[in-house]
Amino acid sequence: MIGLQQLPFIDSHTGGEPTRVILAGGPNLGRGSAADKLAIFRGQHDDFRRAVITEPRGSDMLVGALLLEPADPSCIAGVLFFDNACCLGMCGHGMIGVVATLAHLGQIRPGEHRVETPVGIVTVTLNLDESVSVTNVPAYRKARAVTVAGPDGRRVTGDVAYGGNWFFLIDDHGQSLDRANVDALTAFTWQLRQAVNEGGFPEVDHVVLYGPGRAAGAHSRNFVLCPGRAYDRSPCGTGTSARLACLAADGTLEENARFVQESITGSTFRGRFRWVDKARGIIAPTITGHAYVTVQGTLLLDSHDPFHAGIP
Ligand code: PYC
């Protein structure tokens, strides 16, 4: 496209993790399902993803959310999520950001709504206290106690689970989950991601380390490595969904019991689950958190700007 493309957007953060909602002006992705639209977006519009998310307009930690007309008329919207590296199936903190953004615009009222994503329909509730609950797509554990070689040659064991994205989840890692240690945690989890991918789980693109909770009421604290090597400032909604599936499968968390997950920044999500298919270990997770709108504006993409699609 030649000229100046204008993209109205709203930024928010959910537990410290930013979401950029693109309200209009995105590419024509046809009239199919969100999964069909994702295939077109991924195949033909990667420059749009990079323009919106990467430098100089964005940053590595930003997650984008492109609002779409839903194909399913029971949904209020469709949405595609993407980050500095790729498209995401779902995004928990991002969905909370989308709902807070729609509420900020006066486009939704408190209550339950349905939103289409490429991996399925998600039910969201804008609560009266302005928190948002997301009942995610079904989550499950694919493999228990997968052992890979860690960076120091030490064997590391974790579970592989799905919660809208794919995760390798590790309790016994010997790392200190402190913000001052983020560089080391990033290097450690990046190497574990490569090891688990090579070990038969190429689908895993997020790695989570767990430790004891520190915030009031938190059951657990985590560090989450995202696909583009940034770490999640929030407790990660899809990661918490995958974690709930593992806890449910192990019988260490009861249906509907409250589980509070803390992030490396100290922000928290409340989680709970109900069984969808207990025999097969499939759950419906619900994650609750708060998002706050931070910026409203228009991105300008000048086709003459050598970095209009980001810095290559
Ligand atoms: O909250 O699901 C999430 C998420 C995925 C990547 C960053 N945040």
Image (tube, rainbow, N blue to C red):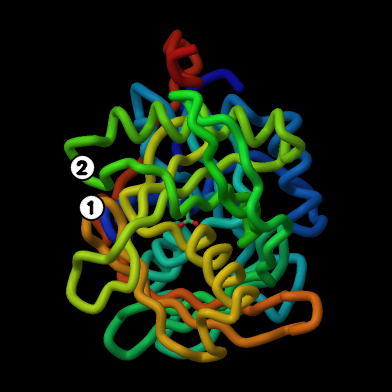
Q: Which mark is residue 36?
A: none
The residue furthest front is 154
Depth order, front residue of 284/85: 284
Q: Are marks 2 and 1 in contact (CB under 8 Å)?
A: yes
Depth order, front residue of 263/100: 263
**In terms of image quadrants, where is residue 114?**
bottom right
Q: Earlier in the sequence, mark 2 or mark 1?
A: 2
- The residue to which callout 2 is attached is 179
Q: Amino acid at mark 2?
A: Arg
Against 254, residue 104 (above or below) is: above
Q: Amino acid at mark 1?
A: Thr
Q: Label 2 to label 1, Cα distance in Å?
A: 7 Å
- The residue to which callout 1 is attached is 265
From the top left corner, tell me how far across and down residue 45 is, in percent.
66, 31
In the image, what residue occupies the spot 46% across and 11% down? 304
Depth order, front residue of 125/74: 125
In the image, what residue occupies the spot 42% across and 31% down? 188
In the image, what residue occupies the spot 27% across and 35% down? 182
